[in-house]
Image (spheres, rainbow, N blue to C red):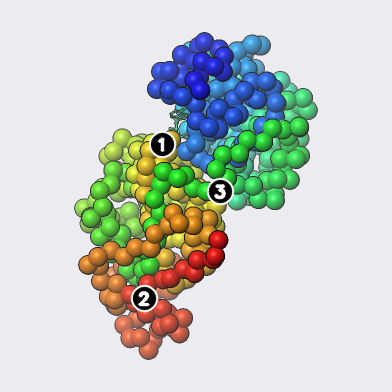
Amino acid sequence: MTFEQFNLHADITAAVVEQGYTSPTPIQEQSIPHIMHGRDVLGLAQTGTGKTAAFVLPLLHGLMRGPRRRVRALILAPTRELAIQIHESLRALGQNTRFHSAVIIGGVSMDAQVNAIRRGAEIIVACPGRLLDHLSRKNIDLSTLETLVIDEADRMFDMGFLPDIRRIVRLLPGKRQNLLFSATMPDDIRRLSTEVLHDAVTVQINHTRPLETISHSLYSVEQHLKTALLKELLKCTKTDSVLVFTRTKHRAKKLAQQLDQSGFSAASLQGNLSQNQRQQAIEGFRDGSYKILVATDIAARGIDVSAITHVINYDMPDTADAYTHRIGRTGRVSRTGEAFTFVTSEDTSMAYTIECILGDALEHKTLPGFDYDRPRTVGPVQAMSPGRSRQHRTSPAAQPARERQQRPGDRYRIQVPSR
Ligand code: AMP
């Protein structure tokens, strides 16, 4: 299929060509015609499948007819980074349309946002909290809204935004087109979709399975050896851009510093950074100034760096969905990528769940030559474990029973269920 077959407005098709998109991705192929026909759409697609353009293109097409200089479309996104990324897509794909879009996110001045709205933005891309702030101050008039897009709805739910979304939806005109995108469909999102969508077409792409262009490996390692293993892996693996995930902001910052001190070009992306610092980290990663970005799940949401070759789960994600989201950062649109996940004895049940999702696609690996038996040493912390243990033990007798059962070097075996 080609983009011409959609019969999008010529100005929009020209921008698609300029972006270098030659053919639509499956989510685009399946959802664009329905959206152009005015249907509500429930899109089940992971990040990296081209889902932003799947709603941006028909949205722009629909806006080409009708009045200007009033708010006609609202796109809700869970994080600032994703909102900015959607705004950039709107700019790129709408470059010939003269539409204005305003980004409404926290962490930056409200005044500039009010100015952007007053200049006549037809499209608002917003995070729910800041949008509600503006709405309560009557800075935005949504009475002329025609289309609502809720992007990454499952992440909105994870971040506790569903009450805010419901509050926003109640303020919108009843007659409107609704598009809801989510990588997964937990019950709460199913409920939200029945409240928001009317007679919706469901488009499902690769539900909950990470992209198939990615190879997945698990490395069993004790907590205190993770940083050493990471450095060794980085030394002996051919990588371009590496995204490393940690569980906490503190750990992301500390690990990036440790990598930097060891001669790797690394930055962190975590919630304690100002909006400017975050943008700097993302830009530096995108333009190759940093080869490694160490991030938390929330901060990494919405990073659109198409050349990420490796995702490394330094800390195991909390849910299988989080695994899917993290891994969706590599292997984007037909590129291949590798995902490495460190598994400690505390992570076995999560590793099992991931194994169930991935089946044969998963490999258990050990790094040849790496000393998995190295004991925990007294002195500088080699791997951080805030909130857990800050003690450094040398004697096995001092270790709790759970740790002793999992002796250093023991390789974690995941039981594969019969399929
Ligand atoms: P998304 O899933 O929206 O985050 O998109 C992932 C990446 O795919 C972005 O870098 C897009 O610019 C790119 N992309 C979207 N649609 C296409 C397409 N039809 N052909 C090639 N790249 C695309």
Identify the amino acid type marked 1: Ser
Identify the amino acid type marked 3: Thr
Name the element at disc 1: loop
Name the element at disc 3: loop
Question: Is residue 306 at all visible to an observer of this figure?
Answer: yes
How far apart are the two marked residues, 1 and 2, measured between alpha carbons? 36 Å
* Disc 2: which residue: 410
Binning the other alpha carbons within 10 Å of mark 2 as few (below 14), some (14 to 19) or many (20 upward) gives: some
* Disc 3: which residue: 208
Q: Position of residue 241 (x, y in %)?
A: 32, 44
Disc nearer the start of the sequence (3/1): 3
Q: Is mark 2 within 8 Å of ligand 1?
A: no
* Disc 1: which residue: 334
Front residue of 69/369: it is: 369
Q: Foreground mark, 1 or 2?
A: 1
Name the element at disc 2: loop
How far apart are the two marked residues, 3 and 1, measured between alpha carbons? 18 Å
Where on the picture, by quarter, is residue 286? top left
Q: Is mark 1 within 8 Å of ligand 1?
A: yes
Binning the other alpha carbons within 10 Å of mark 1 as few (below 14), some (14 to 19) or many (20 upward) gives: some
Residue at the far right: name it.
174
Residue at the far front: name it.
419
Q: Is mark 3 within 8 Å of ligand 1?
A: no
